[in-house]
Image (spheres, rainbow, N blue to C red):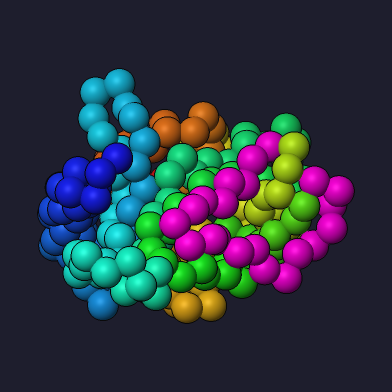
């Protein structure tokens, strides 16, 4: 994709994200001061969109300036594997993309749904951080590195929407909403409902 096309797509996504944030604020949801990640995935009828990209750099013709630009992160296809039993860990997966000229590190993950969320590799070893390379991506997937939720406050059920707070070394803490079930199954309605319980565990069956 050309830089011009990427900028056009980014502007369109930011406009949709801003509209979603404004609607959420009207419902007492997400504060405008809170930073969030844009999540995009194809839907049958609508574009499933969760919130805002940040760190956008002004266009420049200088390769050196582009190389030193700050991280510009986005997240796609977040989801949790449906639990197979009522106890034990639950795994989460997602892809992070960095359109900036500087790498960033994912150093922590938290969620209202669990006391602990850890980065775990395919062998089950806990990792202190993961790097999202400059102008590259990082994928957390089944059978590989992933997020493991343990000490669950409630076991997520199919179609629940789970808040994940991702903390980066440079970009700070941002928020992602992930469905329990297939990737890209999240809808705008799911996000709007989940945002009513921002930073809290929603009541059961809500």
Residue 131 belongs to magenta span: yes
Q: Point out residue 28 in the picture as x, y percentages from the top left corner.
A: 22, 66
Q: Nearer the viewer, residue 103 or 204?
A: 103
Please provide percent x and percent y for residue 190: 34, 42
Q: Is residue 201 above or below residue 183?
A: below
Asked whether 32 falls inside the magenta stretch, the response is no
Seen at 26% across and 77% down, the residue is: 33
Q: Is residue 61 visible?
A: yes
Viewed as shown, does residue 63 lie left or right of 176?
left
Please provide percent x and percent y for residue 44. Answer: 30, 21
Q: Which residue lies at the image location 38% right of the left edge and 64% below the top edge?
A: 100
Q: How many marks?
A: 0
**Which region shows up in magenta?**
122-142
Q: Give the quarter of the image for residue 24.
A: bottom left
Q: Tell me which residue sits at (24%, 23%) in the image.
A: 45
- Asked if residue 108 lies left or right of residue 145, the reply is left
- Residue 73 screen position, x and y as percent: 40, 60
């Amino acid at each position: 994709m050309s830089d011009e096309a990427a900028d056009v797509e980014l502007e369109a996504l930011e406009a949709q994200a801003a509209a979603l944030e404004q609607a959420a604020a009207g419902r007492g949801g997400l504060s405008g001061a809170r930073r969030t990640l844009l999540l995009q995935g194809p839907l049958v009828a609508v574009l499933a969109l969760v919130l805002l990209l940040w760190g956008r750099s002004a266009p420049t013709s200088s390769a050196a300036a582009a190389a030193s630009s700050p991280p510009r992160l986005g997240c796609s296809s977040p989801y949790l594997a449906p639990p197979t039993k009522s106890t034990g860990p639950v795994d989460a997966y997602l892809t992070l993309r960095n359109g900036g000229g500087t790498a960033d590190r994912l150093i922590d993950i938290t969620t209202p749904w669990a006391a602990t969320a850890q980065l775990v590799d395919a062998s089950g070893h806990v990792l202190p951080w993961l790097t999202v390379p400059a102008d590259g991506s990082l994928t957390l997937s089944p059978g590989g590195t992933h997020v493991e939720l343990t000490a669950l406050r409630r076991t997520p059920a199919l179609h629940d929407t789970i808040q994940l707070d991702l903390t980066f070394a440079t970009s700070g803490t941002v928020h992602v909403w992930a469905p329990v079930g297939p990737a890209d199954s999240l809808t705008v309605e799911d996000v709007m409902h989940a945002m009513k319980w921002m930073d809290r565990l929603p009541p059961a069956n809500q």
